[in-house]
Amino acid sequence: MTHAIKWTQLTFGIELEMVCSVKHPSNTFRTSSSTFDTVRETVLSQLRDVAGVSAQLVHKNGNESELPIQYNSKAGLSSPDDEEEEDPDYTLWGVQFDNSVDYNLDDIHAMYPELPILSRYNGQDRIAMARPRYEMVYHNPIEVVSRVLRLADARTWGREIQRVLKAVSCNRLRPFVTDTAGFHVHIGLGDHSFPLEAVKKIGAVVVLAERTMDLFHKEYRRDNKKNIAPLITKEGLARLTREEVFDKIMGANDLDEFLDIVNGRKVHWNEAGGKEELVVRWRYYKVNFTYLQPDDPKGTIEFRQHAATLDYVEIQMWIRFLGLLVVYASAMDVRVLRNILVSSADKNGIIPPIGFICSFTRDEPVARYYLDKIGVKLIVVR
């Protein structure tokens, strides 16, 4: 089967969202935009000097495209030329501001009581000062984005990610993960595109097994309609039977039709009051397929549901889980896939976890890790 994907073909990247609180002794007040620079520059320094990885600062413009920022240690940051936008360099780690992450200062103080007593602040400024030392504390949500890594090179990426986690988990940054922060994983095929048949099978799995996969995640990451909306209850699928959902996804004739089904389009009203459809996909679902579009430099499937974490075991297990799911879903016979996703689900749409895990991971350590999360014991007959 030409659409089957091999483990050795897979590449991946990760996004670690968090809030960092950086102390900056100074008697010079900095504007809100400058605080972003202070926090990101400090994170960048940790990645380069402590983790020993090549890294860049990345800027998200108003359209959420990602652009590299030129960094000069003496001059500081300079915004990219709007007329000459470039794609980020995915051979480097990146640090960018993330305005999707909310936080509460009281929670940060509870975790880091050694921080100076904070004064009130107005508007959007994330600055707090302690007198009489005039020690400023900058709080900003940031996202650390990995370079493209090869899934089969587990020793290489494992060590690299552990160094990065150690570099950001320090008193200099005081990282804090909130309920709105996530740990996102992008799965790709390097310079190659996903075969359509493989994409449809993976899509059928993540839609119809969504309620089963929910069990492996924290409750607040299950039905968050802001940034990780459910797929199974989206418009166009919610009223269909499981058989109809499966047939609709597998019946897509091309990638565009598939994306219409799972991620949809953004629609807005034009100035004349008419309805105008934009070919702009909505990506804020638990799984985002929009980066598979031919004009997108990523070419990945983005898994967005996992809660933010700085725990290496949790991170590497989820990476392995997703890689295995992509491999085994893409290789599975359509009739077998239909039977697992449609016939074996209960009235709540949950597929028996052991059957799901054994079908789509076939890896004992990964199976044990996720079944333990839900109190199910795996017994292996040798």
Image (cartoon, helix red, strand yellow):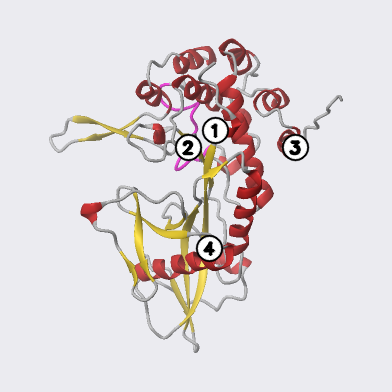
Quick one: quadrant of the C terminus?
Answer: top right
Q: Residues within 10 Å of mark 4 (few under 14, many from 20)?
A: many
Whole-percent x, y for residue 180 in the image: 51, 50
In the image, what residue type sits under mark 3?
A: Pro
Vertical position of residue 333 compared to residue 116: above or below: above
Residue underneath mark 1: 9
Q: Secondary structure at mark 4?
A: helix
Q: Earlier in the sequence, mark 3 or mark 1?
A: 1
Q: Earlier in the sequence, mark 2 or mark 3?
A: 2
Report the Cα–Cα distance between label 3 and label 4.
30 Å
Q: Earlier in the sequence, mark 4 or mark 1?
A: 1
Farthest-out residue, top: 335
Residue underneath mark 2: 190
Residue 199 lies within the magenta run: no
Q: Earlier in the sequence, mark 1 or mark 2?
A: 1
Q: What's the mark number on residue 47?
A: 4
